[in-house]
Image (tube, rainbow, N blue to C red):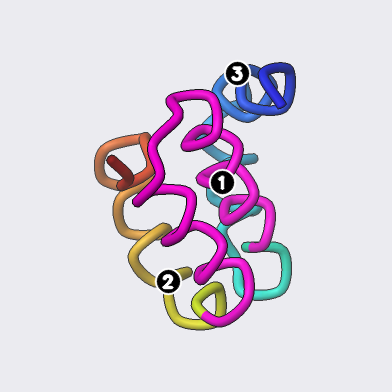
């Protein structure tokens, strides 16, 4: 998990934005889940699981905006 988070953090802005598109946005949902597991954040884990199951179809808009504007993902 730690390797995945580091790998995602090390990607260029273009790759991050491409991974935020609707079909492949599940990669960012998994990123949120792994990052919450590493931080031992129970609320973050629950929210990340919900995003993996139900929210990745909607959250991609927020991901695109925050990645383009701030070059980072909005999460706890």
Residue sitting nearer the eye, 38 or 64? 38
Q: Residue at x 56, y 62 (%)?
A: 49
Give coordinates of residue 26: x percent, y percent: 67, 62
Secondary structure category for the residue under label 3? loop
Give the alpha-carbon distance from disc 2 to disc 1, as whole Å.
Answer: 14 Å
Give coordinates of residue 22: x percent, y percent: 61, 74
Residue sitting nearer the eye, 46 or 19? 46
34 is higher (above) or lower (below) than 46: above
N-terminal-most mark, 2 or 1: 1
State which region is magenta.
26-54
Q: Residue at x 63, y 30 (%)?
A: 8
Q: Residue at x 41, y 58 (%)?
A: 63
Q: Quadrant of the N terminus?
A: top right
Question: Main SS of the magenta segment?
Answer: helix
Q: Residue at x 56, y 58 (%)?
A: 20
Of tags 2 and 1, which is closer to the observer?
A: 1
Residue sitting nearer the eye, 39 or 71? 39
| Image disc number at residue 58 | none
Q: Which residue is mark 2?
A: 59
Residue 41 is left or right of residue 10, and the answer is left
């Amino acid at each position: 998990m730690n390797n995945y988070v580091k790998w995602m953090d090390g990607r260029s802005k273009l790759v991050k934005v491409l991974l935020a598109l609707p079909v492949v946005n599940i990669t960012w949902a998994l990123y949120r889940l792994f990052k919450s597991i590493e931080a031992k954040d129970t609320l973050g884990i629950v929210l990340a699981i919900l995003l993996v199951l139900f929210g990745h179809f909607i959250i991609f808009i927020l991901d695109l905006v925050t990645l383009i504007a701030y070059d980072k993902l909005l999460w706890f």
